[in-house]
Amino acid sequence: MSKRTWDATAGAPGDCLPGLAGPDAGLPRVLACFEHAGHQDPTAAWDAFTRTWNWAAPLAAALPVTVGGAGPVARAVPGGFALSGLWRPPTGDRTDWVALPVPTVRRQGRTGVGEDGRDLFVLPERALPRARSGGSGELEHTAAFELTDAFVAAGLATRAAGTALRVEDTLFLRTAVTAMALGAARRVTDALARLAPDVPADAGPAALSPPDSAVELAAVLHDERTALAAALRGLPESGQVDSSAAEESAVTHLTRVGPTVRHVVVAAYERALPSAGHHEGQSLVRTVEGTSPILQCMRFAVETLPPLGKTTTWKAQHGDERRISG
C-alpha cells in the first residue's frame, strides 16, 4: 500500500478507508473520499489534510533567520495568522508565491516549537518587502526581509511535517481541495435546511424559505459534483494525464466548481442572517467559518498552480525538488 495516502476521517465510506485516497489513487476515489470528509466536518477535514500533506512543498521557500535566539513567529488572528520575523528570500529566479517556514509558532500567549503544527505559510511574492537596486531601478529583495504581523489567510497555512506533494501531484491537490469544498458546502446547505421555514414579510413573492433555498442550493452542488465526477472518471493517477481531451474537460470542471461553491456558501449565509441569533443560525455560521480555509486553498490550487499538462514547462522554470521536507 502506498505511503502517500489520505488519513481519512472516521465514518468514511467503505472504499475510502485510510490508504486508499492519496495522490496514487484514482481521482474519482479522491473526489468521493474528500467530499465525504468535507461534509462530515470541514474543520476536521482541513486539519487532517494539512497534517497529512505538505501542499506547499513545490514552492520556493524563504529561510527563517534567528536573531538573539529568537526566530519568526506566527500567532492566530481572526481568519488566519499574523507573521512576524526575519527571513532570507529564496535563491534563484523570482516566483509568484513563496513559502515562509516558522519553526516556532506562538498561540494564545504560549510559545512552542511546532505548536498546533501549522508552521508553513504561503504569501504572494509581491507582498514581501523589497528595495530598489542601484542603477536598473528594478525591485529586488533585500538580503533579509522583515515582516510585522503580516496576515496569512487560514487556507494558506500548512505543515512542513506532512508528506511533500510534488508538481506532478497538482491534479490530486486540485481535486482533493475542490472535493472538500463541495462537501463543506453541502454541510452548509444541511444547516440551512434546519432553519425555520419563515419568509420575511418584506420579501418578494419569489422568495424561498431557508429549507426551500437549501434544496435548491444542494441541487446545484449535486449537479457540479456529478459533472466533475464524470470528467475525472477514467483519468489515470495524478501526474500521468496524457489525453488532451480528458485534460481539458477536467480543467474546465475543476475551474468551474470553485465559483459555484463560493456562490452556494454565500447565498446560504445571507439567507441565514435573519436567524443568526438562534442556535441553528449560529451552527450555520460556524460551518461557514470552518469552510473558509478550504475555499481559500481551493482558489490557490486552481488559479495559481501549473495547468495540467504544463508541468514540464513549470518545472523548467521553478525546479522539481521538494524544497520543504518534514
Image (cartoon, helix red, strand yellow):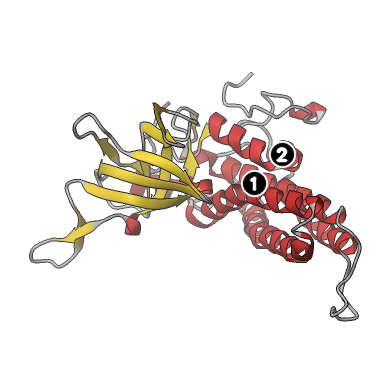
Q: Position of residue 208 (x, y in %)?
A: 88, 70
In the picture, the disc for residue 135 is none
Note whether residue 312 is visible: yes
Reading the image, the residue beneath label 2 is 41
Against 216, residue 238 (above or below) is: above
Q: Residues within 10 Å of mark 2 (few under 14, many from 20)?
A: some
Q: Position of residue 187 (x, y in %)?
A: 77, 48
The outermost residue toward the left is 135
State the quadrant of the C terminus: top left
- Position of 181 compared to 12: left or right? left
First in sequence, mark 2 or 1: give its number: 2
Three-letter code for the amino acid on which mark 2 is drawn: Asp
Three-letter code for the amino acid on which mark 1 is drawn: Gly
Residue shown at 69%/58% (left/top)? 261
Residue shown at 39%/38% (left/top)? 320
Task: Choose top left, top right, bottom left or bottom right for residue 172.
Answer: top right
Q: Position of residue 182 (x, y in %)?
A: 72, 50
- Of residue 143 and residue 238, the one placed in the foreground of this image is 143
Residue shown at 70%/48% (left/top)? 287
Note whether residue 178 is visible: no
Q: Is disc 2 placed on a helix, strand or loop?
A: loop
- Of residue 156 and residue 250, the one placed in the foreground of this image is 156
- Of residue 13 and residue 44, the one placed in the foreground of this image is 44
Against 164, residue 83 (above or below) is: below
Q: Is disc 1 placed on a helix, strand or loop?
A: helix
Q: Residues within 10 Å of mark 1 (few under 14, many from 20)?
A: many
- Position of 214 compared to 37: left or right? right
The outermost residue toward the top is 1
Residue contact at pointers 2 and 1, CB within 8 angstroms:
yes
State the quadrant of the N terminus: top right
In the picture, the disc for residue 290 is 1
Against 230, residue 52 (above or below) is: above
